[in-house]
Amino acid sequence: MPSESPQTPWIERAVASPAVRAGYLSLVAHVVVCIILAILALEARRSPPPAPLELRFGEAEAAGDEQLAEVALGEPIEEPEALAGSSPAAEAVPLPAEDVPLVAVQSPIDAPLPPAEEPSPRLDPAGLPARAVSVRVGGGATAAAQSASAVASGTAAFSPRRGGARGTAALARGGSAASEAAVEAGLAWLARHQAGDGSWQFDLSGCRCDGACRDPGTLTGSTASTAIALLPFLGAGSTHVDGPYHETVSRGIYYLLSRMQPTPRGGDFCEGTMYGHGVTTLVLAEALGMTGDEMLAPSVRDAVRFTATAQDLHGGGWRYLPGQAGDITVTAWQIAALKSAMLAGVEVPSPTIDGARRFLDRVQTQGGAAYGYRTPAAKPCTSAVGLLCRMYTGWGSGHEALHRGVTNLAKPGPHPTNIYQNFYLAQALLQLDHPVWPRWNAKNRDQLVASQARFGHEAGSWFFADHDTAPGGRLAHTALAVLTLEVYYRLLPIYREEAVDRDF
């Protein structure tokens, strides 16, 4: 029998089939068409890769009949090393010889302050370019006009802080070239000790100091330390909008805003103590008053509401925790913040101020000429604090107890080490135009200039042998010293004569 031919494999028969070939070609064609359509759809919907949003307070422009404002959800943070050389704050202070001026700075008494630095490209921590986003915050010509009016009024009120006007005011009210050089050196030291995230810490952690400065503080709570460090920059005319240190201030203000805890009682900046809340509220209110930047207004309103709800309803004061029976130092920061917020256009509840007056009544002695910490006493430091608070809460320049108390405190001259007492008393004497002011100020001014650190990483800073303020360390002492030397032109609303004469 003939042998059978081997059977053709099934796969070859399937491939050879015309029906299978047609189906295969149809499948391939459909897949190709689907891929092309998918690519086209993705291209149509493609958006730029996400980039960090940049916070630009106070920059607004009209578009048609609507007001646009640059808003941000995050201020880019530069690494500390990147700050060196890109900001005047980061430059090292020269080490002068014993017989030359403290630092080589251009005093505003002789020439205007240096112009604000040009904005540099913004990067987020990962190195991506930051992207500004416009958000509608108001409409119509009326809103634009109101915003422009607020900015103009804020700028006019604080114009003596800037340029040649700053030097003129300093000379007219008791400053000197040496005191202005000390202010500039102090600001440079503060800027060099800002952490990469925009904060300052009492223990000097997070900055480039790395233990090079002695006498760090022991207090915790980054809102209090950041806010107290920002106040001198505002006092010298730098805001988050302009000024030689506007980038330093912008990073600091954004850090403070990021720390607010929304609560049913308002915006909480405490971080464990009402000190932090009071000083932070003061900084934000002053920045709002200086720039008219309505982007800050909601935060200031929320902070004021928290201050009001944290008051001791029985005694009228404030202490470390909301509702605690008050002490005069924490209460003073709340009063200062409320006064500044009111002058920046934020409503302050009148019962809150009535309560503050009630607290001052509870701790006064000698008919209101002296004040204690939590009970009636006649201690010099707390008396200086209490008398200034009386000025803010309605005691006019002709009040007998006010004059008597300030005169008694000024008789011995400025304290050689109690920077807190001198800080408050300088404001009271100047705003009263007290006859002893020229003599008292000259001694206080010159002893501050003489006690400023001259060499090394500490150059431009202060530290005093003061037990009461030692927990704040070199950072707190430097900020208070600079603020005291800025009193001649630091027209923060709460320190202006008009603010003292105007009640809440």
Image (spheres, rainbow, N blue to C red):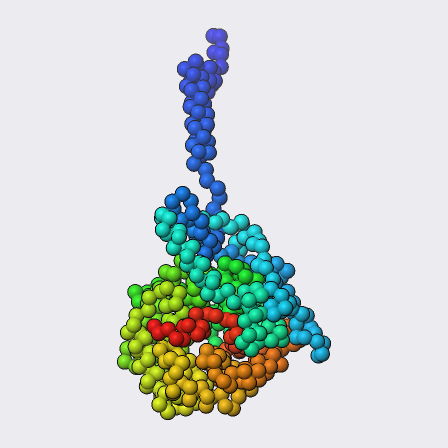
Identified at 38% across, 46% down, the residue is: 66
Q: Position of residue 474 (x, y in %)?
A: 55, 77
Q: Quarter holding the C terminus?
A: bottom left
Q: Nearer the viewer, residue 385 or 257?
A: 385
Question: Relative to 287, is 272 above or below?
Answer: below
Q: Nearer the viewer, residue 337 or 89?
A: 337
Q: Nearer the viewer, residue 220 or 74?
A: 74
Question: Relative to 261, is 500 above or below?
Answer: below
Q: Position of residue 419 (x, y in %)?
A: 52, 82
Number of marks present in the image shown: 0
Q: Nearer the viewer, residue 75 or 448?
A: 448
Q: Position of residue 323 (x, y in %)?
A: 31, 76
Q: In the picture provided, is 174 more to the left or to the right than 293?
A: right
Quadrant in the picture for residue 215: bottom right
Q: Position of residue 475 (x, y in %)?
A: 54, 74
Identified at 31% across, 67% down, the residue is: 265
Q: Is residue 497 visible?
A: yes
Q: Is residue 320 visible?
A: no
Q: What is the residue that sits farthest to the top in this orientation? A: 1
Identified at 50% across, 62% down, the residue is: 239
Identified at 54% across, 71% down, the residue is: 169
